[in-house]
Amino acid sequence: MKGRILWIEGERANSPSFLPALQNRPYDLFIVPSGAVALSRLPEIDPDVVVINVPSLRSNGKRICQSIREASNSLSIVVILPPEKVEIEVRGPEDVLPDSAALGTTGVSSYPKTTGQDSMLMVGNSHAVLLDSNTSPRNQKHSPKAPEYEQANVVLTLPFTFRKLINRIVPLLPGNGEHMLHVGPVRLDLERKRVRCLGREARLTPRLANLLQVLMTHPGEVMQREELFKQVWETKYTGDTRTLDVHISWLRHAIEEDARHPQLLMTVRGVGYRLDI
């Protein structure tokens, strides 16, 4: 699956455009003329990166950046500014979480619980902890300058080359398309063990990624508990499959808006589970 880029570019005269060169790249590129259109199409497009070309707009892009961040804490944002602004760079997705914070592992409770908008979801062996956008390492800024764009992952100041733009965007995109699964709203990066669904992003353990992969390759089908257990745990023993129930619970915390009232990963009583997408 290709990386998906939502590009906001107006029609303001004398503003440079990187679109002709970008359209020749192997990405799914969606071009919209304003922030309002971008916000209305976010659920439909579900981009990996949003690029705001400020010089082409009739605004400074500040409210657009804020609104997109409010709509999704896990979405990467790149802002292109005219020369008088200062460049800031923020760590990309590879620096979001330490390995110990993967879904289905222990040791995540050291992160503080928060009450505001949440970004990356992490689940331990018995409970979930959500990182707030203000405390997540991903959102720690490397510079206090230009605070009006602090919601962006990368801020680039003109002039710069197309190569520099690509070098900033590529780390924010998912892995190679050969390692991606996209079914309905669920997007699974098998290489990086990350899942994105309904505007949320989570890191999975290898076992959880394998379990989700099996379910995604049989969308809408009822998967028997014993068969799921055999495939994911690579064993013929199915005498006790309670660990499967635990992993299903962790998976629901990763992909559902409300894990207690799942709408995607459904239980078929007495049989198994079904991914309704």
Image (cartoon, rainbow, N blue to C red):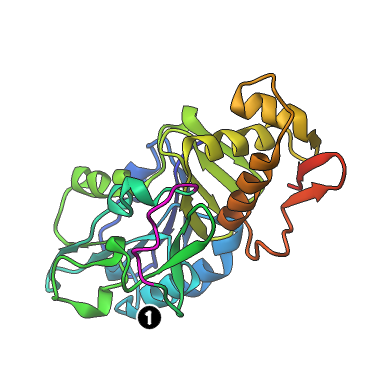
Secondary element under disc 1, as helix, strand or loop, is helix
Q: Residues within 10 Å of mark 1 (few under 14, many from 20)?
A: few
**Horizontally, is 36 left or right of 141 in the view?**
right
Q: Where is residue 215 in the image (x, y as percent from the top left)?
A: 68, 37
**Horizontally, is 115 left or right of 245 in the view?**
left
Residue at the limit of the structure toward the right, as seen here: 270
Residue at the limit of the structure toward the front, as seen here: 239
Between residues 57 and 103, which one lies in front from this camera angle?
Answer: 103
Residue at left offset 30%, top offset 67%: 152
Residue at left offset 35%, top offset 48%: 100
Magenta span includes 196: no
The amino acid type found where label 1 is placed reads Arg
Q: Where is residue 81 in the image (x, y as percent from the top left)?
A: 22, 68
Residue range in magenta is: 104-112
Q: Name the dominant secondary structure of the magenta segment.
A: loop
Q: Position of residue 247 (x, y in %)?
A: 61, 45
How many marks can you see?
A: 1
**Horizontally, is 66 left or right of 17 in the view?**
right
**Horizontally, is 2 left or right of 63 in the view?**
right
Residue at left offset 24%, top offset 49%: 168
Residue 103, relative to residue 257: is it above or below?
above
Residue highlighted by disc 1:
63
Does any portion of residue 131 appear in the rendered image? yes
Residue 46: image quadrant is: bottom right
Magenta span includes 109: yes
Between residues 101 and 138, which one lies in front from this camera angle?
Answer: 101
Q: Position of residue 224 (x, y in %)?
A: 80, 33
Does any portion of residue 34 appear in the rendered image? no
Residue 192: image quadrant is: top left
Between residues 191 and 261, which one lies in front from this camera angle?
Answer: 261
